[in-house]
Amino acid sequence: MNDQFAVRANFVLFLLGIVLLVYIIKIIPSINFDPIIYSLKISGNEYLNSAYLKNMTMPVGGVRFSKLIIPSDLFIKSAHFEYLGNHVAELIVEERKPAFISSTSVGYFLTSSDGVFLMPISKDEIYKFIGLPIFFGIESFNFNKDEIINPVLLDEIKTIFSYPDWFKKLILEVDLKTNTIYFTKGVSIKFKDFNLNEGEEKVILSIISSAPIGTRYLLIDNNFISLSSAF
């Protein structure tokens, strides 16, 4: 009798275990992983306003976690959500950073290192972005409808950004059409291409340090030839 009771009790416990397992598998995840979000935190943003991102992601309170929308903005390179508990989620963004100013056939643009035109700026606003070099010679055929510079031209730009930091600080403007770099003191040098070695970089530093303001040079076969003002 006791043995039969024990068997029945174990069977009932087994069924209860199955029911509990089904509950855990089906019910608990829906509660834990798709909760209603009433509050949203923003992190990783430097250029985009947090209130702007919140309004784009969750314009009203009480949104399911799975229904949160990653904002669409050219400054956003990537983004994802994390649930923090207690109906609070966090939007973690990785932003594109302005790396240079593009002077194009349709105006000036703040541009990221991966060639995305982040926002247009007027010529009068350029002075606000001290420290960003200006790249000239980017015509309309050099970018696509998504406002991204084509890979061929972008490779040339990336070559320039691969220079040592101390060298890049000397660069004010770059003319991609003529392969000319304009350095501090108004010194300009025309290159065959933008692939420079360490020795050439050091010679250029010496030239900038000692040359008269506005001197123009031409690099031919590793020799820097000074050009007259009439050239």
Image: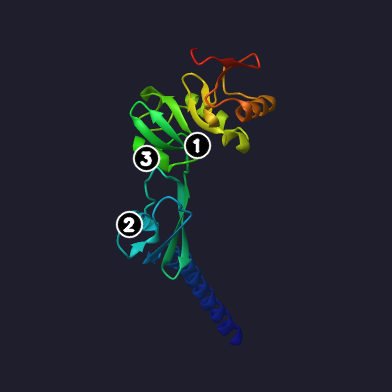
Front disc: 3 or 1: 3
Give the residue at x 61% y 83%. 3
Q: Earlier in the sequence, mark 3 or mark 1?
A: 1
Q: Residue 125's mark?
A: 3
Q: Residue 113's mark?
A: 1
Percent across and percent down for residue 87 are 41, 68
Give the residue at x 42% y 32%. 102
Front disc: 2 or 3: 3
Quick one: which residue is furthest to the front in this view?
A: 212
139 on left or right of 160: left
Can the viewer see residue 146? no
Q: Residue 52's mark?
A: none
Within 10 angstroms of label 3, few (less than 14), some, or many (20 or more) residues?
few
Foreground pick, 202 / 49: 202
Residue type beneath disc 3: Glu
Percent across and percent down for residue 151 are 48, 27
Q: Which residue is mark 2?
A: 55
Q: Earlier in the sequence, mark 2 or mark 3?
A: 2
Q: Cβ–Cβ below 8 Å for labels 1 and 2?
A: no
Give the residue at x 40% y 30%. 103
Q: How far apart in space, not on screen, are marks 3 and 1 (Cα)?
A: 20 Å
80 on left or right of 198: left
Quick one: which residue is furthest to the right in this view?
A: 199
Secondary element at image label 3: helix
Can the viewer see residue 176? yes
Within 10 angstroms of label 2, few (less than 14), some, or many (20 or more) residues?
few
Residue 60 position (above or below residue 162) = below
Q: Earlier in the sequence, mark 1 or mark 2?
A: 2
Quick one: which residue is furthest to the bottom in this view?
A: 1
Percent across and percent down for residue 74 are 39, 42
Residue 201 position (above or below residue 193) = below
